[in-house]
């Protein structure tokens, strides 16, 4: 069975199309909400927190990894019911929830309000939208109808726009334009009809089939990409996957390789690499290869493409998103439903 046929058989809600549309998501997201006004200034802000969960929190990690080298105040991501004690009237809190009803994020919004933080809401609907409008908070309204993980770009762009409007980061539009072009080129090269080794996402899917992916990257820009790959493998293909970063894993996890060779062979290591990785991280990755490949399969290396940090990061994210959908097709899994998450939410709702 061809990959295209396998996708048509299982992808009942069009997850592949949502991934393939990522370039147009950037253009659409940039045009939307241009008129959102921020009623505070740069000099009033001493720290930034992005509160969210799942796909909405990943947008915060994207902003953090992209902008931490140029933003003059710290950017943190909160995946919890409560915010840190540092949050106060000098804090900018982005409340990010695609559905608008995420219970942890609603709790974080209440906490931000009690701490007199400056609040910006990013959502498509739900109680967060209602509360934002009632309180007069700046509100970025997202298009409806997406699984939250497919709305990543719509969740990221408002963060970039807001921080640029405040003068905290440079204008993201030139990088967005380049990113669109890079993703369009990858889209053409990685179409499901192309069943050759040059189709990197398909090669990844075929290689990890029947194994557990272990995704390693350097800390910094591609740190969030590893988290994204891990999450997409789990949600879209319904398999366990793991990720970690250099150099941290060299101080602990490295020791675990080789002790149980039979188990190691059930793992498939994937390196996410960027030409601007720190030279010592590049060396560490090369040295670890010697350790890992003594007991398990050859490491897959995925290199970023493009010039800007945004293009390089999203070239890796886009490749991983496609790989997870292609793996779902190979496994006969519909990549859209997340029945275990739905069950958990329904059960939690009964115990409010």
Image (tube, helix red, strand yellow):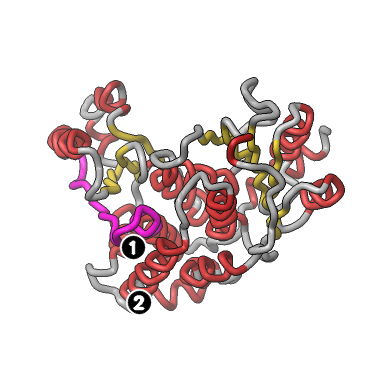
Question: In the shown orientation, is residue 273 left or right of residue 84?
Answer: left
Dividing the image into 4 quarters, which one contains the C terminus? Answer: top right
Q: Looking at the image, which is closer to me, 124 or 243?
A: 124
Residue at x 51%, y 66% (from the top left corner): 26
Task: Say the numbered circle drawn on residue 201.
Answer: 1
- In this rendered view, identify the residue nearer to me: 260 or 222: 222
- How far across and down, in percent of the image, does residue 256 sit? 28, 25
331, above or below 60, in the image: below
Q: For residue 326, what is the image quadrant?
A: bottom left
Circle 2: element type? helix
Pointer 2 residue: 188
143 or 320: which is nearer to us? 143
- Position of 148 compared to 229: left or right? right
Q: Residue at x 24, y 47 (%)?
A: 276
Q: Is residue 204 above or below residue 178?
A: above
Q: Position of residue 345 (x, y in %)?
A: 72, 43
Residue 190 in the image: x percent, y percent?
A: 34, 71
Classify residue 216 by image quadrant: top left
Report crowding for label 2: few under 14, some 14 to 19, many 20 or more residues within 10 A (C-alpha): few
Q: Which span of residues is magenta-colored?
A: 294-314
Tell whether 290 sits left or right of 333. Answer: left
Residue 17 visible in this rendered orientation of the protein:
yes
Quadrant of the rendered image containing residue 283: top left
The CA span between labels 1 and 2 is 12 Å
Which element type, helix, strand or loop, lies under badge 1? helix
Q: Residue at x 29, y 74 (%)?
A: 195
């Amino acid at each position: 069975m061809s990959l295209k046929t396998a996708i048509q058989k299982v992808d009942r809600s069009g997850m592949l199309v949502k991934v393939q549309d990522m370039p147009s998501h950037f253009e659409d997201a940039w045009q939307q909400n241009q008129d959102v006004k921020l009623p505070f200034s740069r000099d009033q802000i001493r720290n930034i927190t992005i509160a969210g969960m799942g796909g909405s929190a990943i947008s915060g990690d994207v902003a953090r990894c992209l902008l931490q080298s140029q933003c003059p105040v710290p950017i943190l991501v909160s995946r919890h019911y409560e915010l840190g004690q540092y949050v106060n009237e000098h804090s900018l809190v982005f409340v990010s929830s695609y559905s608008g009803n995420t219970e942890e994020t609603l709790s974080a919004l209440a906490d931000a309000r009690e701490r007199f933080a400056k609040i910006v809401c990013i959502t498509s609907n739900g109680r967060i939208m209602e509360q934002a409008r009632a309180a007069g908070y700046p509100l970025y309204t997202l298009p409806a109808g997406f699984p939250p993980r497919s709305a990543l770009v719509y969740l990221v762009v408002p963060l970039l726009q807001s921080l640029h409007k405040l003068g905290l980061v440079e204008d993201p539009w030139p990088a967005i334009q380049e990113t669109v072009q890079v993703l369009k080129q990858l889209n053409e090269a990685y179409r499901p009809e192309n069943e050759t080794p040059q189709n990197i996402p398909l090669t990844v899917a075929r290689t990890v089939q029947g194994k557990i992916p272990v995704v390693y990257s350097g800390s910094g820009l591609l740190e969030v990409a590893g988290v994204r790959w891990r999450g997409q493998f789990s949600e879209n293909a319904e398999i366990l996957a793991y990720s970690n970063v250099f150099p941290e894993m060299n101080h602990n996890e490295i020791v675990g390789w080789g002790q149980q060779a039979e188990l190691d062979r059930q793992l498939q290591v994937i390196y996410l690499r960027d030409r601007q990785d720190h030279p010592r991280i590049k060396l560490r990755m090369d040295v670890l290869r010697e350790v890992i490949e003594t007991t398990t399969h050859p490491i897959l290396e995925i290199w970023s493409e493009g010039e800007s940090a945004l293009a390089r990061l999203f070239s890796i994210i886009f490749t991983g998103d496609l790989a997870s959908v292609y793996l779902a097709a190979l496994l006969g899994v519909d990549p859209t439903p997340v029945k275990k998450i739905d069950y958990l939410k329904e059960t939690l709702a009964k115990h409010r």
